[in-house]
Image (cartoon, helix red, strand yellow):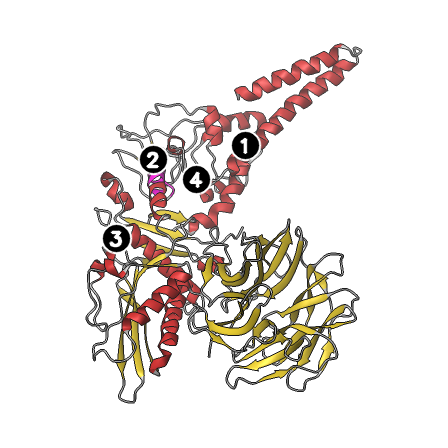
Amino acid sequence: MSHAASLRRTRISLASDAGGKTTPFGWIGALTLHVAIVAATFITWQHKFDIVNETPFVPVDLVTLADTTNVAPTVREEPKIEPQEEFAAIQPDAATPPDIDAEPAPDENAKPLEQKPQSTPVPSPREETKPRPKKKKAPADPMAALLDQLTKPEAAPKNARVANQKVDGIGRMNAMTADLQAMIQGMIYKCWNPPAAAPHPERLIVTYRVFLNPDGSVAQAPQLTATSSSGDPYLQAAKDSAVRAIYVCAPYSLPASRYQQWRDITITFDPRKMAGVE
Amino acid sequence: MTRMSGWLLKIAGLLLLPLALSVPAAAQLHVDVTQGVMQPLPIAIPNFIAPGGGTGPSGADIAKVVRNDLASSGLFKSLDPASFIDPVRDINTPPNFGNWRVINAQALVTGQTAMQADGRLRVDFRLWDVYGEQQMVGLQYFTTPENWRRIAHLISDAIYERITGEKGYFDTRVVFISESGSALQRKKRLAVMDQDGANPIFLTRGDYLVLTPRFNPTAQMIAYMSYISGKPRVYMFDLESGRQEMLGNFPNMTFSPRFSPDGNKVVMTLEQNGNSDIYVMDLRNRSTVRLTTEPSIETSPSFSPDGTQIVFESDRGGSQQIYVMNADGSNPHRISYGEGRNGTPVWSPRGDLIAFTKQNGGAFRIGVMRPDGSGERVITDGWMDEGPTWAPNGRVLMFTRSARGGRGSQIWSVDISGHNLRRVPTPGDASDPAWSPLIQ
């Protein structure tokens, strides 16, 4: 926001200089220009949001990611941290729909979290589309009704639960596991000898479900999750190379305290990039 | 603004809905691996055992050929037998995989030889997945004992195919021009050898010049250019009978022959009054059709693997470049637009690439491009690398590399990725290799 404000200031001062040289009639023009410029900055700002929204999920900045998970939304009794506007605006990361903090909430009587609409937790895209008002009797004062809605506390998402104990997030796209993801990625790529130079590498993407022992060793033979056409020697080689990578990299040294998060993982091996397919 | 971001969110959400729904029901940690490390697969190939006694070809020799084949591909690392801690005693019981994991072997080959009562050699082998702890391939071969090298190559092909998914290329031969003698009295002889340089055989005595030999699709016939009658003409050599014959009695010079993929035709260049054009001869009735009519030089034709197109070089545009036309000569169009001059195109047996010689900045190098001319890559970095020829699986190329200052030439091989550059052992200097198809 501060960036936008400064930008606006610069533009306005420039416009004022120009305005000084015009006739009184120019006032209207200048005003229009001002409005146009202010509006333009909004458009630019909005556009910037677009770019932010489209930025793919990059599991590097763990601090930032810690605010985005997809575990069932948990409602807190006393929100200690007010959602900051600027951060909230970046929140709607398309790749991480729900926005919920898995912090402990000691008090039982859950009161919905008070938030501005744009920082509202969005449990899932489906949920999002639901609350659209379909039929509505014309309100006496539409503006007042609108304001009313804006100030109305947001209802807790349907699947929200009251958190009464500390729960480490478990599951896919959970910020708590993003670091594990990166760790496993960092280990396994060194062990993977991808099927190179095979024609049509897009058909050689394989996914395995892997169960690990607490010591990081492979608990049982990795299971292919999707059955693909057999009899293709390239695919067979791709499957073998994936399984070899899983075994060769074991034992995986991962934080023992979080075994529940990594005991059961799925790994997708995608050779397209290695084959030079754009 | 708020409404807009909400609206955008919805769109984004809707777009991502299928993604969200495809998540496995159990909330698991999911890891995407899109990067790997290309490294040779460590493979242990202990000497083949001979439970029935030590007659016949040695199991150590067979294992050595297999080790050498796989290592030469650049995709395998044959582990040093001295590091093996678990001697193979019986290939029909699963090995103790732990003893092979200790030495970092990811694959293990065990084999045995036995002489049959009828005098034939029997070779069994098994390929084991050391980490998956299971057999990947198990095969058995019978042959005359002298043929043990071919068996070793066939085993290499089976292992290569199972692990890479590609067809192998070890049971193949290479025909080439063997060169000897001083620069002034250079003797050029037609020679053929196994792809690993073993069993070299000279097919001609060297009293006349021979050039550009090419295998037919059954690897039994070789077409080449020779001055056997004092004039440069295309000849055919039958490897089985040792017979050779002139291919069509044209009044002028014929050269750069190459077989069609079905082996029924030979496409070649015929020179008349300084103008070279491409002709195709049907070997069944010896009829000849002229395919190009330009006043420029057209030569080095090579069929696409489906036989519908021909790639060739031409200087019709001012400099030597690569063109593609239909097999009947229609629709010729230029495909090479890179720097320098490009010649000697050869279509990959896999069809996806064309290898060629690029002449640029005083150097000759081997390059590959797609049949539409896109994706050009130069894959060697010598001073004089020329005349590429494809392994039957389209993964490896051989070519002639000449040293600076005319100090002879050798045959080298390189992977189409540009890695794994190796010299192919030949008796003396050698040039103009042509790789055979897989031997049937």
Which chain is home to disc 1? A
| Above or below, comparing residue B152 to residue A157 in the picture | below
Dots 1 and 4: beta carbons under 8 Å? no
Foreground disc of the pair 1, 2? 1
Q: Which residues are magenta?
A: A173-181
Which chain is home to disc 4? A
Residue A258 location in percent, x, y? 25, 40
**Residue B313 vs residue A211: left or right?**
right
Q: Which mark is residue A49?
A: 1
Other-residue count near label 1 (Cα within 10 Å), few / some / many at <14 / 14–19 / ≥20: some
Q: Give the residue type at disc 4.
A: Thr
The quarter in which the N terminus of chain B is drawn is: top right
Q: Give the residue type at disc 1.
A: Phe
Q: CA distance from mark 2 to mark 3?
A: 34 Å
Residue underneath mark 3: A218
Q: Which mark is residue A74?
A: 2
Which chain is home to disc 2? A
* Of the image marks 1 and 2, the number of the one nearer the N terminus: 1
**Residue A238 vs residue B387: left or right?**
left
Give the dominant element type of the magenta stretch: helix, strand or loop.
Answer: helix
Residue B13 location in percent, x, y? 49, 43
State yes or no: residue B182 in magenta.
Answer: no
| Same-chain status of marks 1 and 2 | yes
Foreground disc of the pair 3, 1? 3
Other-residue count near label 3 (Cα within 10 Å), few / some / many at <14 / 14–19 / ≥20: many
Which chain is home to disc 3? A
Secondary structure, mark 1, is helix
Q: CA distance from mark 1 to mark 4?
A: 16 Å
Q: Is residue A117 visible?
A: no
* Of the image marks 3 and 1, the number of the one nearer the N terminus: 1
